[in-house]
Structure formats: structure tokens, C-alpha cells
Image: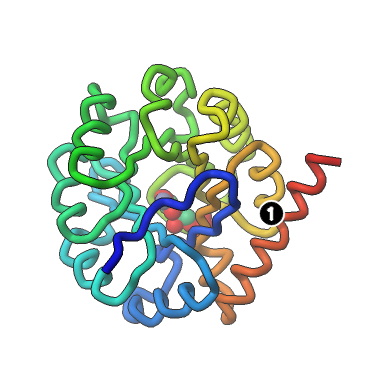
Amino acid sequence: MTKPRLPKPGTIEINPSILGADFARLADVLAVIEKAGVKMVHLDIMDGHFVPNITIGPPVVEKLRKHSKLFFDCHLMITDPRKYAPLFIKAGANHITFHIEVEKKPADLIKMLHDKGVTSGLCLNPETPVKTIEKVAHLCDMILVMTVHPGFGGQKFIAAAAKKSRVVRQLVGPDIRVEVDGGIDVKTAPLVVGYGADTLVAGHAIFSKKDHIAAINALRLSSKRAIRNTRS
Ligand code: DX5
Ligand code: ZN
């Protein structure tokens, strides 16, 4: 199987978060979103330490890999990404995002991830300033801006945190993806795309709707409106 790759910057990608989906039917969920034409899927990994919730580990990622050709974007909300990232890569992750709040030597870890054949990204919690990633952002393939406090799906979008995606876009230029995560829906998507985000994680907005494909298309449409608005 050819290895899925992070889509080149320059397109808006809807990135469904399976945290919002029915965990008893994940293989079916992956098939449906693939049918909707998405290129990637967002896997939220939580350890009960960095965030007050526990989700999935490498064995689940490994099983999902057998059911999907999508690009696996693994968001590690864990206190020890250095220790566990290799296990997720072995299980089939294509991209590893870790939080700047837990890593003292981010450049080192980014290099380790690249050496292991995956793309990598840094994530900023809502209260974490962009200056914490200033020196290493250019080493990443994608920067993730949290627009809710990590840990749970279906939370309210934090507008002040979303504004940081504009600063991140200015920092990294056009060649690195800027991802936003939390509370993204048809109302907030135009806003974040206007700020320069190009990779929109969405859980509740897709999986709380019966028709997941229609929900993905609605998000696509709303983000296109934003591009027109910012250009006009
Ligand atoms: C929250 C996760 C998100 C979450 C987003 O900690 O990182 O990926 O699934 O869910 P919604 O889109 O429902 O806010
Ligand atoms: Zn996430």
C-alpha cells in the first residue's frame, strides 16, 4: 500500500475527528468519511494525565490501519510523547502532533519523528502563547492551534484562541499547514479559514449529524465562503 501523505499546503482540508463518532463502529465510520472524499482523519490520543480523559492507544490505531487508506493524523494529548510516539508510528500513524507544553526539546523530537518516516506537528493549548513555538515552528509540517481546552469533543469554540491561528500563519508562511481543533462548525469554519487555517478538525459538527457526508460538504462550503470573503 502506498503510504498516505499529508496533503500539500494550498488546499482546505476537512479533518474528521473520530472522537465524536460511534466508537463501536469505527471501521464503518472510516469508510463513510473516505466516501465523502476526505484525505485525512484526526485520531485523538489521551492519557488521563495531560488531559482528564482516556481514549485510544496503539492497538486500536493498528486495527484501524487495516480498514483505511486515509492519512492518520495522530494528536497526542499525552505527557510523554517521546516515549509513546514510536508505538503509534509502528501502529500506522502518518503524522504525530505533540503538545509544546510537555516537551523541553521539541526540535529533537521533531527530528526523531521525521527520521521515523512521519510528518510532525506542534500543538498549542488555548492559553499557550505563539512565542513558545517561534524557534521551532519552521521545522514542523503542520501546527495545531487548539480552539477548545483539550480533552473532550463538543465544547464551545474559544474565539480568542482561534485568533492565534492568524499569528501562526504569519510565523510559518504559506508552506506549512495550520490546523485548528475544537468547536469547528459551519459558523466558525469561515472565521478560522479567514485567519489562515487550512486544516479543520471537526468532530461534533460531523458525527452529531445523521448524514456525515452532508455535514462534511457543509463544512467545505462554509470554508469556501470565507476564502471569497477575505479576498473581496
Ligand atoms: C479535543 C480534541 C478534538 C475534538 C474536537 O480535545 O482534540 O479533536 O475531537 O471535537 P469537536 O469538533 O466536537 O469540538
Ligand atoms: Zn484533537
Residue at the limit of the structure toward the right, as seen here: 232
Residue at left offset 78%, top offset 40%: 230
Residue 129 on image: x %, y %: 48, 23
Residue 178 on image: x %, y %: 52, 40
Badge 1 amino acid:
Ser
Kindly tell me whether mark 1's CB lies below 8 Å from ligand 1. Answer: no
Q: How many marks?
A: 1
Q: Which residue has dot 1 on it?
A: 223
Residue 154 visible? The answer is: no
Position above or below: 189 against 231: below
Residue 161 on image: x %, y %: 56, 34
Residue at left offset 35%, top offset 60%: 4
Q: Nearer the viewer, residue 132 or 20?
A: 132
Q: Quadrant of residue 67?
A: bottom left
At label 1, counting other C-alpha atoms closer than 10 Å, the crowd grade (few under 14, some 14-19, many 20 or more) is: many
Q: Which quarter of the rendered picture does the C terminus lie within?
A: top right
Q: Is residue 143 left or right of residue 11?
A: left
Residue at left offset 53%, top offset 23%: 171
Residue at the limit of the structure toward the front, as seen here: 2
Position above or below: 92 against 159: below
Q: Nearer the viewer, residue 152 or 111?
A: 111
Q: Is residue 87 left or right of residue 12?
A: left
Residue 211 visible? The answer is: yes
The secondary element bearing badge 1 is classed as helix
Residue at left offset 45%, top offset 27%: 128
Q: Which quarter of the rendered picture does the N terminus lie within?
A: bottom left
Position above or below: 75 against 160: below
User: Which colour scheme appears in the figure?
Assistant: rainbow
Q: Quadrant of residue 21?
A: bottom left
